[in-house]
Amino acid sequence: MDKRTILAIVLSIVVLLGYQMFFAQKPPAPPQQAAAPTEQTQKAAEPAKEAAIKQTPAQKTVTTKEAAAKTVAAPKDVTVETALYTAVFSTKGGALKSFQIKGYQQECTECAEDIYPKIKKMIFGGNEPLPSKKAGLVELVNVKDGMPYPLAITFPESSIDIAPDSAYETSATKLDLMNTKEKQQLVFSQNFDDKIKVEKIFTFNAETYTINLDVKVHNLTDTTVNQIPRLSWQQYADPSWEEDSYGHDGPVASIAKSIERQTIKELDKEKIFGPNVLWGGYESKYFLASFIPGNPSLTSITMNRNAGNMVSVSIKGQKELIPGGQNGSFSYTLYLGPKQYDLLKTQNVGLEDSIDFGSWLKWLAMPLLFVVNFIHNYVANYGIAIILLTLLIKIIFWPLGNLSYRSMKSMQDLQPKIVALKEKYKGDQAKLNQETMALYRTHKVNPFSGCLPMLIQIPIFFGLYKALLYSIELRHSPFFWWIQDLSAKDPYYITPIIMGATQFIQQKMTPTMGDPMQAKIMLFMPVIFTFFFLNFPSGLVIYWLFNNIFSIGQQYYINKKLSH
């Protein structure tokens, strides 16, 4: 029993260490790493129009005097306001210039400095005003001067191509969807040398982050033209941006239900995937700018980065033959918003897989997240919701915990007899094992039952780890006092240290088996766990801390009951 117990404990430590090392080896911010589209302000880099923007193969854009005049005309902005976001479109490319998501603040690296005076004021009081650094709203668009805007449409490999920054016309000046549930449309149109007329029709729903895009191509000639559309998202990859090592910032796509992610460093040459592109786009840890093609089976996706650090994610649609005087159309669904599971799920194309729960652990992470959200609906604090989830798990496994503690107590009582057997059969290991197992059977002791709670806790721990780390519901969600973001580590390491102390108390209460080596290993367990938890999300630390507290209470109850 002693060796098996030690082996189980060592394996648990190895699993935890391996998992920590696995996440620690997530790609760090490379020298050319892209800034997350949603986690940075649009800091205007020095204009670099001289950097060649390689968007598509050689363009066949028409160059009539009228079209040229419209190209150099000052572009006009059109603002679309909803309760969920503020979008700014431009007649330059009929594309997206800005997209700010309401209700979500950008990461503020300086905001942590405000916590010190707040804690001081809580402890000592005072009337002086507290400093406050407010970050702006999350912005999905980040482009430099000279770059085309996201959602530009081109037609490479077609009869007639257009530049991504071609000038469009629109009669709209602003769309206000703040006080209406009715859908509204924004139409951009342009006639290119009397050969084709292109219309980009955006349809907005005030209650969702989904936007429908219909592209209509009118053939103004007498001959058939073939058009192959390419819809693109452009993003400036700031080389100085330090990416969260636990998240991915860059191109992402679902190819035949398989998620393909590309780091900016890997985009040293063009990458092409498809067909069967269910969706594609540009993501950060918590936000997604994506497009869903109308015909996935005939759609491919291209990802690249040029010398000016512009990252492009483009989906190329099916070839459309448009007879003279007739029209062709291409349809897309856009989702620009947070990676919130229930919102992504409604698209029915696997967009929820953009949340990096993992292919195996998501079956644990999703139910745990569902329960946490359900509890949160009643307590309005995710920290309390995690504590109540911990209590619920402890109640469910209460009988198993009792069995484990009783088994360990029984094993402790059998130690003198086991020591005697070791002395008696010192030179005969086979006989010693046989007699030891006979002793267990006689006293109805299962040598493995003491390890079960730890083994069961490990998958639950990993599932909750994923749920807390990648669920946007916990992003910037406060608990109390200094813990203002349950998805981030405790900035002062207070909860990990308290957690280590409770681990030590629990260890002191656990019956020992009399093996010196095992006693030494168990002595270091609280230290090892504290070290592991220093950089874990504070929500996960709270879970393990209160799991220890509830376990101490249960163990005290069992020990007291067995002593009578």
Image (spheres, rainbow, N blue to C red):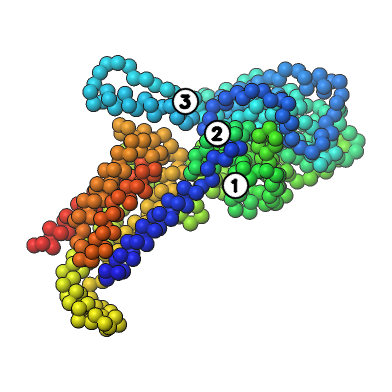
Does residue 154 appear left or right of residue 424 in this picture? right
- Which residue occupies 36% across, 41% down? 538
Q: Is residue 125 above or below residue 410?
A: above
Q: Relative to the observer, which residue lies in front, 288 or 324? A: 288
- Which residue occupies 30% across, 41% down? 495
Q: Is residue 158 above or below residue 17?
A: above
Element at badge 3? loop
Q: What is the CA distance from the residue labelled 3 to the residue labelled 1?
A: 28 Å
Q: What is the CA distance from the residue labelled 3 to the residue labelled 2?
A: 17 Å
Instruction: From the image, tell me which residue sits under label 3.
Output: 135
Q: Position of residue 352 (x, y in %)?
A: 53, 46
Q: Which residue appears farthest toward the right when viewing the image?
A: 222
Q: Which residue appears farthest toward the front when viewing the image?
A: 427
Which of pointers 3 and 2 indicates the residue nearer the eye?
Answer: 2
- Rendering quarter of residue 30: top right
- Rendering quarter of residue 66: top right
Q: Does residue 365 appear in the picture of this structure?
A: no
